[in-house]
Image (cartoon, helix red, strand yellow):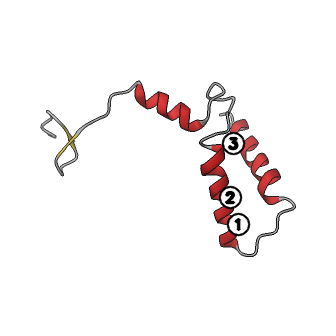
Amino acid sequence: QDNAPVESFFASLERELVHDERYATRDEARTRIFESVEGFDNRVRRHSSPGYVSPAEFERAYNQKRPRLRLHGSWGRPLGGTGM
């Protein structure tokens, strides 16, 4: 199993948001890191692993290729199935 993408992510996170930064509280640090990851890394930054697109673009393209499973009522069974 290749951990290189995860190791690269955490190295970038530490370099950009942890080293040489001073946060008043843990909540401030948590908020800043979350905003950076969710707002930039997942939506804007292109990554080499999924073909130089952002994770959000990759997920959107992936989901467009697959039909959505429609569930029946509150039972959580696929439409047309008996669930037995």
What kind of residue is marked 1? Ala
Kind of element beneath mark 1: helix
Disc 3 to disc 1, C-alpha distance: 20 Å
| Mark 3 residue element | helix
Residue 39 appears left or right of 3: left
Tag 2–tag 1 contact (CB < 8 Å): yes
Q: Residues within 10 Å of mark 1 (few under 14, many from 20)?
A: some
Q: Where the C terminus falls, by quadrant? A: top left
Which secondary structure lies at badge 2?
A: helix
Residue at horizontal 17 percent and vertical 36 percent from the top: 79
Frontmost of labels 2 and 3 is: 2
Q: How far is mark 2 from mark 1, CA to CA? A: 6 Å
Residue carrying label 2:
33
Observer-nearest residue: 33 or 11? 33
Name the foreground residue: 2 vs 62: 62
| Residue mark closest to the camera, 3 vs 1 | 1
- The residue under label 1 is 29
Which badge, 3 or 1, is on the more N-terminal residue?
Answer: 3
Residue 18 falls in image quadrant: bottom right
Residue at 12% over, 37% down: 82
Quarter occupied by residue 17: bottom right
Distance, label 2 to label 3, CA atoms, is 16 Å
Q: Please give the name of the residue rendered at 55% of the width and 33% of the height, measured from the top-left corner.
A: 57
Above or below 77: residue 57 = above
Residue type, label 2: Ile
Q: Can you give x and y, in whole percent of width and height, for residue 69 in the image?
A: 28, 35
Provide residue 29's location: percent of width, then percent of height.
Answer: 70, 66
Name the disc covering residue 6, or none: 3
